[in-house]
Image (spheres, rainbow, N blue to C red):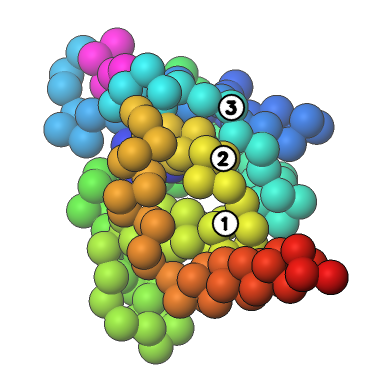
């Protein structure tokens, strides 16, 4: 997801039993005063989508939900129940963009990884999907790109592993023609 899409996720957008999440809004990180203006439309029509979640993500979300529920119990009416956000501060309020970016930077630093923009998670996910054999069309739909050309332009050339797998498939196919 894009950072605004992830930040706009509400618990009502997630179906843990079906392992899906509905992406339908984006968060305006400028935090306008009016509550209804916090969430806007996604980047394009294709950005509204239903994503399948892995078992690992579902387990992490269940754990996170337990933490959120504990915060709700402890803070009671001081908790922002009305927002119902998945990614939020301890009291349920919105996470500012700078806090999100700083937390990501700290995680990278602790893991002794180079500094990267948070959007690199989205790119890494796309490359790993392609390396695992996902089609370009599937990746386009999962990322919510307006068209497959956008996905192809960004990701088609990015991985040597994809290139090597393609050559191996080609060689295997042409060898089978000669038998």
144 in relation to 167, above or below: above
Q: Between residues 166 and 88, which one lies in front from this camera angle? A: 166
CA separation, marks 3 and 2? Answer: 12 Å
Question: From the viewer's perspective, is the residue at label 1 or at label 3 nearer?
Answer: 1
Q: Which of the pair 71/106 is nearer the observer?
A: 106
Q: Which one is closest to the eye, mark 3 or mark 2?
A: 2
Q: Would you say 163 lies left or right of 177 here?
A: left
Magenta region: which residues?
35-41
Q: Which residue is mark 1?
A: 129
Determine which of the numbered discs, if any, sits on residue 50 in the image.
Answer: 3
Rounded to the nearest whole Å, what is the CA distance between mark 1 and mark 3? Answer: 17 Å
Q: Residue at x 16, y 19 (%)?
A: 33
Q: Residue at x 36, y 64 (%)?
A: 157
* Element at label 2: helix
User: Earlier along the polypeptide chain: callout 2 or callout 1?
Assistant: 1
Magenta residue check for 26: no
Other-residue count near label 1 (Cα within 10 Å), few / some / many at <14 / 14–19 / ≥20: some
């Amino acid at each position: 997801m894009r950072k605004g899409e992830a930040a706009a996720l509400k618990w009502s957008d997630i179906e843990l039993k079906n392992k899906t999440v509905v992406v339908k809004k984006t968060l305006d990180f400028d935090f306008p005063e009016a509550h209804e203006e916090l969430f806007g439309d996604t980047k394009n029509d294709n950005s509204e989508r239903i994503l399948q979640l892995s078992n690992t993500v579902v387990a992490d979300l269940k754990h996170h939900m337990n933490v959120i529920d504990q915060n709700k119990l402890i803070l009671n009416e001081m908790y922002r129940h009305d927002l119902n956000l998945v990614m939020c501060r301890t009291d349920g309020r919105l996470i500012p963009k700078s806090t999100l970016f700083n937390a990501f930077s700290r995680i990278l630093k602790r893991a002794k990884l180079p500094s990267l923009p948070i959007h690199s998670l989205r790119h890494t996910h796309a490359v790993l999907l392609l390396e695992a054999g996902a089609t370009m069309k599937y990746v386009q739909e999962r990322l919510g790109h307006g068209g497959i050309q956008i996905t192809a332009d960004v990701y088609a050339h990015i991985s040597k592993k994809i290139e090597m797998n393609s050559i191996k498939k080609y060689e295997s196919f042409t060898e089978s023609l000669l038998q």
